[in-house]
Amino acid sequence: MTELEARGRTLKSWQTRIVAMGWMIYAAYYFGRVNLSVAIPQIREDMLLSAQQVGLMGSGFFLAYACGQLFSGYLGDRLSPRRLIFGGVLLSGLMNILFASTGVWELMLVAWTVNGVFQSTGWAPVIKLLSDWHRPEQRRTVAGIFATSYVAGNAVTWTLAGWLIVAMNWRAAFWVPALMMGACALVWLLLVRDRPEEVGFRELESAPSGHGGISSHRIPNVLDGLSRFWPLALAAVTGGFILYSLIIWLPSYFVEGLALGSGTAASLSAALPIAGIFGTMTVSWLIATRYAGREIRFAVGVYSCASALLALFPFVSSSVSGSLFLLILSGSILYGASTIITAIMPMLLSRNNETSTIAGFVDFAFNVGAGLAGVGIGALLDRYSWTAFFYALAGVGALTALLLLSFFFWEKRGKPAVKAAVAEPEPNR
């Protein structure tokens, strides 16, 4: 084996480690994020809270998370992503402990909102680190693998939190995950480095390649992106609203709508992110093999299918098996579609020193929608029924497809920034 071959194998080993650690640490963020969803019925019963009050917790979290994405995206391009993520995971775990240790709703609201700020230190800096460790032609595959992390983290957290609530109480669903987050943060700090140069490799090329990638037009900053990519930003808002409406309120639907126990509801709800793992992997494979350069058009069809499935929920509302079947299909589609908007597009749009900023901007828009899902759906449920909940989500799904379609036609009119984002791949040379 030549020295060049040996260094190539060593680089590949490091790249595998970076992907594995990025996957692990972002899944760990979810230990201290979606545990609230499973605990909502018990928190409401214990503290006599309305759905709107609990919804305010979710909205406070996601709006703080969305705003934090802009700062974390900016900082991720200028500070050490490794250290930024380490601090964010530890402080998020601390907020989980504080949230579960107080019995005052106002203090819980503040703690969960601040938790959103620390949770925002994950997505954009990890995307930045993965991009710095991989060449452009590797990034579609890497983005697809990494995107399964939050889906798996969601499933594990719901299952674990449901078991802890049944075995102990709802507060344990925040204390135990916080300790797990601390352990993951230490592993991350010890095993990860920010860039290949830190361990003796040359800097990898960062300009997008010709095959199936985004062309080398100037990449916008946050404000420029808002004006140039407004249909995509709005689609991210509505896409976030749909997915997180299900994440926040699905366990409550099984408890209140289908009269199931908390443990059973948590286990059934975990089917959503588990299905999302397969949906994310399938969408990523299709993007990498058949729809490279046509990501937006593919996403239009995916959200149209999700809207139709959500509209069918009220017709099977009395059946646990029927609800679960539609849930699995909807989860796989929605998680896969979200991957296109929040992971694949930012990595393909990346250029020197701007990957984290772009990922932060897109995730900001996505989580504005998530924030609206908390209080908006809470208010809807206080006044109407679960049937209205699913019809509302179906309508927002159709709106998301229309916004993405407008992004496609914006490209047809010749807008250069958008044309770069949905261009057909060039042939191999």
Image (cartoon, rainbow, N blue to C red):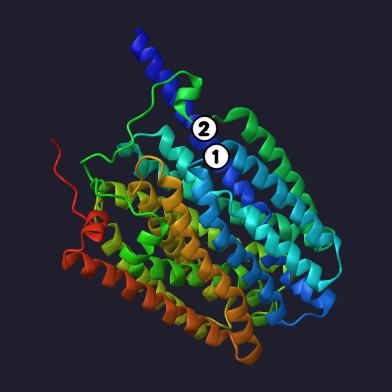
* Residue that appears at 86% across and 64% down: 102
Q: Residue furthest bottom?
A: 383
**Residue 194's disc number:** 2
Task: Look at the image and tell me in which quarter the C terminus lies.
Answer: top left
Q: Is residue 405 left or right of residue 331?
A: left
| Above or below for 210 versus 226 | above
x and y percent of residue 408 in the render? 24, 67
Q: Quadrant of residue 25?
A: top right
x and y percent of residue 108 in the render? 78, 67
x and y percent of residue 241 in the render? 50, 72
Residue topped by disc 1: 81
Disc 1 crowd rating (10 Å Cα; few below 14, some 14-19, many 20+) is: many
* Residue that appears at 75% across and 58% down: 163
**Residue 163's disc number:** none
Q: Is residue 418 left or right of residue 360?
A: left
In the rendered structure, are the residues bearing label 2 and label 1 in contact, judged by CB atoms less than 8 Å apart?
yes
x and y percent of residue 72 in the render? 55, 51
* Residue that appears at 41% across and 39% down: 131
Helix, strand or loop at mark 1: helix
Task: Look at the image and tell me in which quarter the N terminus lies.
Answer: top left
Task: Look at the image and tell me whether residue 156 can be seen.
Answer: no
Q: Amino acid at mark 2?
A: Asp
Q: Amino acid at mark 1?
A: Pro
